[in-house]
Amino acid sequence: MSQVNDAAAGHYGDRPWLAPGAVPFIHIQGVSKRFGDFVAVDNVDLEIYKGELFALLGGSGCGKTTLLRMLAGFEEPSSGNIFIDGADMRSVPPYERPVNMMFQSYALFPHMRVEQNVAYGLKRDGVPPAEVRRRVEEMLAMVELSDFARRKPHQLSGGQRQRVALARALVKRPKVLLLDEPLAALDKRLREQTQFELMNIQDKLGVTFIVVTHDQEEAMTLSTRIAVMDAGRFVQIGTPTEIYEYPQTRFTASFIGTINMFEGTVVRDGGGLALDCADLPMRLALPEHFDGGEGQQITLAVRPEKIRMSKTQDAGGGAVVSLPGKVRDLAYMGNLSIYRVEVGKAVVQITAPNQRRLDQREITWDDEVHVGWDTASALALTE
Amino acid sequence: MRKQRSTFLFSALCFGMAFLYVPIFLMIFYSFNYSKLVPVWGGFSTRWYGVLFQSEEVWDALALSLQIAVVNATFATLIGTMAALALVRFGNFRGRMLFSGMITAPLVMPEVITGLSLLLLFITLEGIIGWPSERGFTTITIAHITFSMAFVAVIIQGRLAGMGQELEEAAQDLGAKPFRVLFDVTLPRLAPGMLAGWLLSFTLSLDDLIIASFVSGPGATTLPILIYSRVRLGLRPDINALATIMVLAVAIGVIVAGWLLFRQQKQRTREMQMAGK
């Protein structure tokens, strides 16, 4: 862990943005990027703190890569400013920025051996040869590639190339490491393993990581905070938990994970407010956080794992929703099962752990069931 | 139906190949003829190769042609590569369209026109600044560079366009200034293409007759000029021998250039696979 991080953040180690008086390490201020008529990045503001592992998450063409390239210096913002460690990056060329990038294609120099690839950046900085050798060896040992130092990139596997690219970018001890889809080219098993390696390395070196990814799972497991991007703007910025449990918009809710959404109008029901949804046989109780009024059009969203299902009516307390339905579809995933239950005209998706073996389970196709959830688990989305 | 078509295609192929290569093989064949009269077969012999190399005139012409070819190929490769870099990597600068059109113009320009216009240029220059004071090595070399560099530029342009800029960006990201990037990353990757361009320029220069005869002077006789002037006085067996040697030299040059371009293509495919695209 870096000293600055410890001193400024104290016990906020993992969440430096919460520390009182914390100074952002990277400050993106009203940055836009236009290519002709196309606005790739649209007036975004972002503060990233030292030691964070920050993910820019979004679909293709949402502007996340353009933003990363502006941080690296390959693109100049059309307007706005970028500050890294207090220094204005305007017209600072890529080769003078305190950042290094790991490219999606890794961009290893094909005519150089692994050790030469890793040493390249140090040599450009005029580091003495003995120290270059020491640091390259150290770095290759860290990514467990010491035995491959004399190979050419085309003699390595995809995972090994990825680690060479990481070593090459980290050996210069940059203040910020930019990673463009770092795991996209790896197969699933390798990806999971590499995820944890990346987190360990980041923890060990205390370098600020900014990861661009379209893979929500990757963003969830890797990062301290996530910025969800759409059409050149940030939709929501928050910790993985915040983004998953409290998405602020329908876009975020449906982009991250799966979610059931019920659209309808807010009506007065007995003492309080409820949602009148045309597709459902009964009204839905609203969560307490809802502060809107009667007549408003909203979406009630519930994650599939937060929904219970039983053959008998849910006997829980007052703060639950309970709906009758029929199991239409069932997908067995090994550790859990996905149920699609028809409720009125809507289909509710439910995931449940397989606590019993497949042939012993209680609920199966065409069973009449009751589905329900705690009202506090649902979200009322207005945007 | 299918059978008929393939017979037709096959005979067309044979005819085409014969049309292209029978004259050359005939020439090679007669270069080993003992008889002094070209079309009369007098038995196998390498006599005319011996005669050829006793002639000082032939040696001088060969030496001049080789010198011109080497200097031409070197300069054409340098200038052609720079032109290609400017066209592909410097974005949309003012006059880019004009430049890219002009650079390929020498490829389609009739050689007579190129030769004539260069001759006029040299004469005018001599009148104004007194250089070039005589026509020969320098003028022929300059003339050859003008069209050879166009070929090099086209080859390098193709390679650059397919290369993508990610490696250059990676080098910059690691702290290399643009000039350094050129020498560390761009040029090593262009090397096979540049070598192919060099060899192509070399062969183009070696067998050029028309442009060279326009811009050469009294003391400067290149090999093609020598052959042409001798043949005008009648077919001679030693010229067959000389031409056979030239065919061999040019064939080697073209085959090596082709092989280099093929390898470059293969490397590109490999890089694409590596990038996972």
Image (cartoon, grey):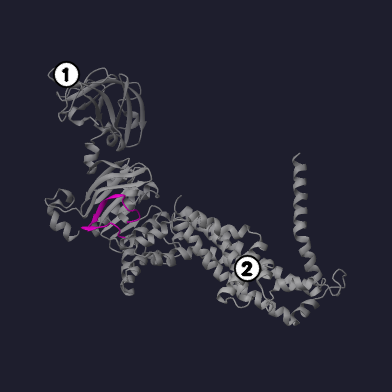
Q: Looking at numbered disc 1 in the image, what kind of residue is underneath it?
A: Arg
Residue A318, how many percent across, how many down? 14, 23
Residue B154 point in image, percent of width and height: 55, 59
User: What residue range appears in magenta?
Assistant: A73-92
Q: CA distance from mark 1 to mark 2?
A: 97 Å
Magenta-drawn stretch contains A46: no
Q: Nearer the viewer, residue B169 or B105?
A: B105
Seen in the image, is B88 located left or right of residue A140?
right
Q: Chain of mark 2?
A: B
Quarter assignment of residue B28:
bottom right
Tag 1–tag 2 contact (CB < 8 Å) = no
- Tag 1: Cα neighbours inside 10 Å, few (<14), some, or many (≥20)? few
In this rendering, does residue A143 appear at all? no
Label 2 residue SS: helix
Q: Is residue A375 left or right of residue B74?
A: left
Q: Position of residue B7 (x, y in %)?
A: 77, 46
Q: Quadrant of the N terminus of chain B?
A: top right
Kindly identify which residue carries mark 2. B120
**Chain letter behind tag 1:** A
Horizontal and vertical percent position of residue A222: 28, 48
Horizontal side, residue A233 vs residue B231: left or right: left
Residue occupying the point 33% across, 31% down:
A338
Q: Between residues B77 and A191, which one lies in front from this camera angle? A: B77
Q: Which residue bears the numbered disc 1?
A: A268
**Residue at 16% from the left image edge and 59% from the top image edge:** A4
| Count of all numbered marks drawn on residues in the image | 2
Helix, strand or loop under label 1: strand
Given this view, does label 1 or label 2 mark the residue nearer the observer? 2
What amino acid is found at the position of numbered circle 2 in the picture? Answer: Leu
